[in-house]
Image (tube, rainbow, N blue to C red):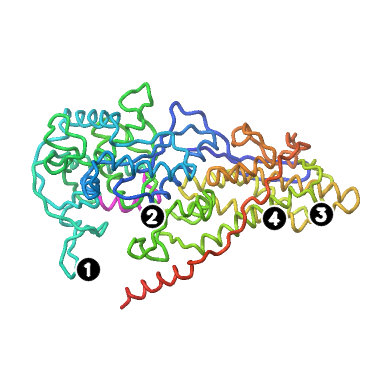
Amino acid sequence: MWLQRSVRQYSRTIRLSSVAIWQPEAPQSQPHLITTPIFYVNAAPHLGHVYSVLQADAQHRYAALYGEKTRLSTGTDEHGMKVQQAAESLGKDPYTFCTSVSHQFRAVFDALDISYTDFVRTSESRHAQTVNHVWLQLEEKGYIYKGTYHGWYCTSDEAFLSDGQTAMKTDDKGNQIRVSLESGHQVHWMSEENYMFRLSTFRPLLLRWLQTEPVRPANFQRIVSQWLEDELPDLSVSRQRSRLTWGIPVPSDPSHTIYVWFDALVNYLTAAGYPNPHLAPWGPSTHILGKDILRFHAIYWPAFLLAAGLTPPRTLLVHSHWTCGGVKMSKSLQNVVDPIECVKSYTKDGLRYFLLRSGAPDHDCDFNHYTVRTLLNSELADALGGLLNRCTAYTINPMQRFPYYNPDSIPSSAHDQLQDLLRSLLELPAEVYQWVEKFQVNKALEAIDAKVRQANAFFQSQAPWKLYKGNNKEVAWAESVLYITLEAMRLYATLLQPAVPGLANVILNRLGVSPAHRTLKENHFLNAALGRHCFYQGQSLGPDCGLLFPRLEKKDGEEQFAVRKKDYRETQLV
C-alpha cells in the first residue's frame, strides 16, 4: 500500500547509518476503497462493531497520513429474515425499525470520531439499483439459474449450510438440535425452489486469487485454503417472497427476494459508485471484517465479482472477537460492554486507544475495566501526557518556544544515548508503516509507546532543569535536550493522529504546529540534529492545554462485576 526505502542520514556530530525513512509512492489514479462490514440492524451497536470500524478508520487515517488517497465506507445491513422478525416482534414496519437502529450506529460512530466518507444503507434506492444491475449481469451470463435448494439454513447467520457444516447438540432444555459448526446457532432443514449461483464454477479462479495472499493475518488465509480443498456447491441466492418480504425483489422475478448476503456484499460496489464509471470505478479495495463472516467475504464475494467481470478484493483484513472477563459477552451475564458508556468513562480517544492498542487481530482479546484503566493511565496519562507536561512547563521552558539545537554542546557522556534516541525516532515512521501494513495497529502503537518511554528516560537522565543552572555549555545542552524532546513529541503526535485524533490534536496545538504540517508528506523531524535547517527552532508554542489525559480512578462496581464473571466460569466447570 505504501512505500518505504532505506537511506543513510548523517549529522555533524552523529552518524546514523541504515535508518529506514518513509518515502511517498507515486499518486494513485483513483482512491483506494477501505470498508467495514455493513452491520446487521437486528440489535444495537456493541464493542465488536466498534472494533471493526476503528480498525478501518485507523487504516484510512494512516493512509492519509502517509499521503495516500483513500475512502472509508461503512453502513447498515437492513434486509433479511432476522430483521423482518425483529420488526414484527416490536410491532413496527421494517423500514421504520431499520432507520431507528441505523441512526444508533451512526451516533456511535460519530461519537468515536470515525472518519467515514460514505454510509450505505441497503434499504436505499441507490443500493437497490446496484444490486439489480449486478444480478442481471450474472443472470445474463448464465451464472444464475433456477433450481431447488435442499439443505440446512441458519436464520441467525443468514447462511445456507451443508451437512458437513452442521452437527447435533443438546440445548439448555435437554433437546437435541442441529447447529452450525462455525457459529453454534441452530439450523433448520429447508427445501424450496430458489435461484442458484454457479459457485462451483469459480473454485479454480478463487484458488488462483488466493495465491496472491489477500487474506491477513496468515491463520485466516490458511482457513480459506482449507475450505477450497473441497468442491464448492452452488449457492442459493434467493428466497421465495411468500416467506421473506423484507428485501430486494429479484428484478426478473418479483416472486423471489434476493439472498441477504448477495444484497449485503454488493454494498461495496454501491460505495464505489458502480456501475457509473464517472463516480469512482471499482478498483483497489481493502475489506475489514470479523472472523465470523470470513466465508462470505473470502468465497462468495470474490466469486460474485469474478462472475461480473470485476477484480476481487486486494486485501481482506480479518480480526478476531472481544470477550469480557474471559467469557463471551451476553445480556444474561450482564457483561455486554456498551460503547457509549465506555466513551463516557474513558473518553472517545481513551476507548479508541485501548481497543487499537490491546486488540490483536489473530486471536480473541478480553475487555475488562481494570485493564482499560491501567493501560490508559500508564501510556496516555503518565508516559505521553507526562512527557508533554515536562517539556512545555513554564518552569523549564519560560520562553514557551522551541529552543535552538547546539551540536557543539553534546557531552561525551550523552553521546551514545542521544544517538540511540535519534536513530529510534528517525526509524519510527517506517516502523509504524510496517506494522499498519501488516494489519497490526496494536504493534504500531506499542512501538510509539516504547519511543515515548525512551524519550522520557533521555529527558530524565539529562535533567535539563539542572543544566539550566550551570555554565553556558550546559545551558546550551539543556536547550538541545529540550529541542530533541519537543521534536519527539511532534513526531509522536503526528503518528498518533489515526489512533487518537483528539489527543493528537491537543498536543500539536500545544506545540504550535499548523494544520498544514500534520502529515508525513514533505514533513521533516529533528532536522537541526541532522545538520539541516529546522523551521521550528525559535517558534512559539501554542496555548497551555492543561493535563493531556487525566488519570482514571476505579469506579464502584468493578469488583462485583469481576465476581459475577468468576462465578459464571465456576458454574461452567460443575
The CA span between labels 3 and 2 is 47 Å
Label 1: state its secondary structure: loop
Badge 4 is on which residue? 456
The residue positioned 86% from the left and 49% from the top of the image is 475
The dot on residue 465 is: 3
The CA span between labels 3 and 4 is 14 Å
The CA span between labels 3 and 1 is 67 Å
Disc nearest the viewer among 3 and 4: 3
The dot on residue 320 is: 2
Mark 2 neighbour density, 10 Å: few (under 14) some (14–19) many (20 or more): some
Extent of the magenta region: 214-227
The residue positioned 16% from the left and 42% from the top of the image is 244
Residue 492 in the image: state x and y as whole percent. 62, 46
The dot on residue 71 is: none
Badge 1 is on which residue? 172
* Amino acid type of the residue that numbered disc 4 sits on in the rendered structure: Asn
